[in-house]
Image (spheres, rainbow, N blue to C red):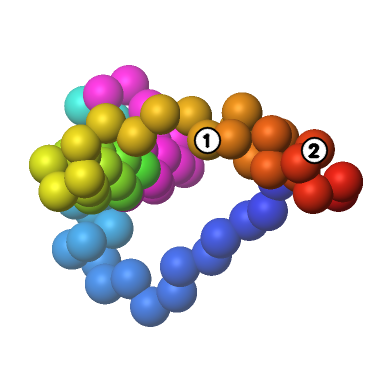
Amino acid sequence: MGDIRIRNVDEATKQTIKASAKSLGMTMEEYMLDLARQDRLRVGRRILAEARKGAKAIYKKHGFMSDSAALIRAEREENGW
């Protein structure tokens, strides 16, 4: 695993993070790592929601699309590929 160092954090921000971590029974490092993980999950959920929205738009425009693998195999066999 890698390390991340944050420089030039003002004292008020540092104290806020320290107090938040302490109130949750965490170290500052644990608290900041938890925030980073939550952000990663939030980004993943946003990407998934956008993909679902795109899939719904395609379905609405074109209807259900069956699996094309069988068609591709048949074409390959027909052409000797």
Between residue 58 and residue 53, name the one nearer to us.
Answer: 58
- Is there any visible trace of residue 37 in the rendered image? yes
Helix, strand or loop for disc 1: loop
Q: List the residue tagged with mark 2.
A: 77
- Is there any visible trace of residue 49 in the rendered image? no
Q: Which label belongs to residue 68?
A: 1
Rendering coords of residue 19 (x, y %): 22, 40
Between residue 74 and residue 12, name the one nearer to us.
Answer: 74
Mark 2: give few (<14), some (14-19) or many (20+) Cα within 10 Å.
Answer: few
Rendering coords of residue 28 (x, y %): 40, 42
Residue extending farthest to the front is 78
> Which sits earlier in the primary sequence, circle 2 or circle 1?
1
Q: Main secondary structure of the magenta part?
A: helix
Rendering coords of residue 70 (x, y %): 61, 28
Q: Is 40 included in the stretch rendered in magenta? A: yes
Q: Quadrant of residue 71?
A: top right
- Count of all numbered marks drawn on residues in the image: 2
Distance between mark 2 and mark 1 Cα atoms? 14 Å
* Range drawn in magenta: 24-43
